[in-house]
Amino acid sequence: MSNGCECGCGGKDEKLEKIREVIAKCNGDKSQLIHVLNEVQELYGYVPTYVQKVISDEMDIPMAEIYGVITFYSRFSLEAKGKYNISVCLGTACYVKGSQAVLDKVKEILGIDVGGVTADGKFSIEQTRCVGACGLAPVMTVNNDVYGNMDPSKVKDILAKYE
Ligand code: FES
């Protein structure tokens, strides 16, 4: 078994070794795929393609099936996120109260689009559908912090807290 990092960076990939251990404990039980993906999401913050390949090889599950599971469940992400992931709700209640303008302001300040990560890895942006806080619309979250009654003029000060 190789300890080399399979992403090509040449370093030791301790996270991948941990995932291999999790897979080994599944004893070939394919129904444990979600459990394994949960561990990957927790460790990496997303599910990198090269890790999907390792899971596919070691659990004998087609890549397409793994991809299908990742895209079905919103808790799994295919892309790296920033240290602070900003999420703006575009669900109906938030949208009618102007959440698109909030999202546009976040994009303008950070200079990245939805799905992007800033060059320093600090911020990423995503848009979501109703997060269950419609009474606070429009809603923006930064990791687990929830900001309600948002207004584009509040975005700069909120982001500054995470600098
Ligand atoms: S629509 Fe945004 S929280 Fe419900």
Image: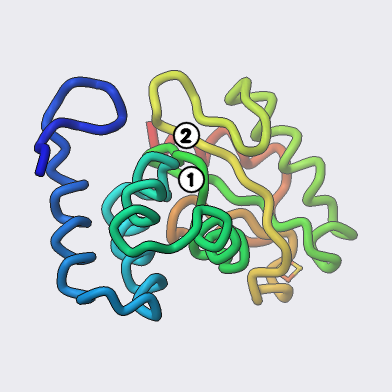
The residue carrying pointer 2 sits among few (fewer than 14), some (14 to 19) or many (20 or more) residues within 10 Å by Cα, namely many
Name above or below for residue 116 compared with residue 49. above
Res 49 quadrant in image: top left
Proximity of marks 1 and 2: CB atoms separated by less than 8 Å: yes
At x 23%, y 65%, the residue is: 23
* Residue in front for this viewpoint, 54 or 84: 54
Q: Residue 123 location, x and y as percent?
A: 47, 34
Task: Identify the image quadrant of the N terminus.
Answer: top left
Res 112 quadrant in image: top right
Name above or below for residue 4 compared with residue 36. above
Q: Residue 9 location, x and y as percent?
A: 24, 21
Q: The disc labelled 2 sits on which kind of residue? A: Phe
Q: Disc 2 beta carbon < 8 A from ligand 1?
A: no
At x 9%, y 37%, the residue is: 3
User: Mark 1 or 2 closer to N-term?
Assistant: 1
Q: The disc labelled 1 sits on which kind of residue? A: Asn
Q: Residue furthest right?
A: 96
| Left or right side of 130 for 29 | left
At x 38%, y 40%, the residue is: 50
C-alpha separation, residue under disc 1 versus residue under disc 2: 6 Å
Q: Quadrant of ligand 1?
A: bottom right
At x 39%, y 21%, the residue is: 120
| Left or right side of 64 for 149 | right
Task: Identify the secondary structure beneath mark 2.
Answer: strand
Residue at the spot of label 1: 85
| Left or right side of 57 for 131 | right
Residue at the spot of label 2: 123
Q: Residue 119 location, x and y as percent?
A: 45, 19
* Residue in front for this viewpoint, 28 or 37: 28
